[in-house]
Image (cartoon, grey):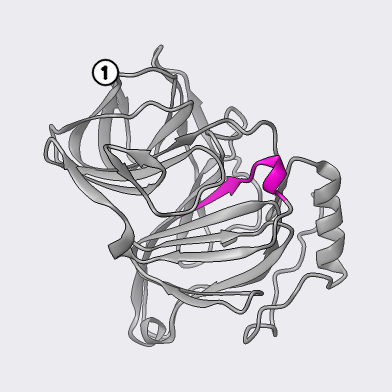
Amino acid sequence: MSINNTAEQDANETIKPCAAIKLIIRPGKKSLGGFSVRRSLPHPGQRLVGPWIFFDHAGPAEFGPGEGVDVRPHPHINLATVTYFFEGAFVHRDSLGTTQVIKPGDINLMVAGKGIVHSERTPDDLRESGSKMHALQLWLALPVADEEIDPAFYHYPASDIPETRINGVPVRLMMGSAFGMTSPVKTFAETLYFEATLAAGQTLELPDTAERAVYVASGAVEIAETAVADHCMAVLEPGSGLTVTATEDSRIALIGGENLGERHIEWNFVSSRKERIEQAKDDWQAGRFPVVPDDAEEFIPLPDPK
């Protein structure tokens, strides 16, 4: 998904608050016509967190009858996308011939590899009735050895995502292993992604991994006696025993995993090699990417260089 055609937002703030927190990213809000997006990654002070190179929080937004979102066909290379809805739905179509509706709690994992094209649109029934849209869109860098694998698409319904309660706190494990659970969602490197819903006053001890960050999708929390407000991402230093405490009813997401090294990002392209991105830009302009069956009439053009 390419909610925003630019690689980064300029309105981000960075705060270095305490020894346990490397920095707190306060992303700026950008309006995209009918809804807004907050982009925490990539950030000038933090390009990746583990393998995660892109983190967008879209909405919440409300669309009236006849309205919706149309993300026209666009390309990706050398990455995998993860789409997760709190509210609303998209119809995903891609150049592999996939057509899949993603609903709240589902995980869509699209592996771009050597190249894929996809689109996302509001389903017809929701467009007719009107709907809400509230989602996270994340990109994973692939290990160098996997950057040019064949593209693939994996869908995991909400019922397949493991859930538990830790001291009364509901936790859903989208990717990786934690809290005695392992998610069925495919990974290519050490990867962690879970969400938790905390009532005011509840505490959750965070699992340790090489790199990790907590995003507050709603509410407010404290980590190492440091306040982290809603829509902020706290990038944590390594170490065990760190806890998050909700100062009001909150929903958080934790992402993390192993560091895969430097990656370049431009528009919808991610790669360990700058020349590979230049090749992909040329291929998109020349029409050498595959088309999306049943959605081949439109496309997002390559942005003009700034």
Given the image, on which type of amino acid does mark 1 rest?
Glu
Residue furthest to the top in view is: 19
Pick whichever, 177 or 264, lies toward us. 177
Residue at image position (30%, 29%) is 206
Residue 29 horizontal side relative to residue 220, left or right: right
Q: What is the x, y in percent for residue 252?
A: 31, 42
Is 112 magenta? The answer is: no
- Look at the image and give the residue range highlighted in magenta: 137-147
Pick whichever, 18 or 109, lies toward us. 109
Residue at image position (82%, 42%) is 274
Q: What is the x, y in percent for residue 253?
A: 36, 43
Is 142 magenta? The answer is: yes
Callout 1: few (<14), some (14-19), or many (20+) C-alpha neighbours within 10 Å? few
Q: Is residue 8 above or below residue 70?
A: above
Q: What is the x, y in percent for residue 277?
A: 80, 50
Which residue in the protein does label 1 denote?
A: 225
Q: What is the x, y in percent for residue 35?
A: 45, 63
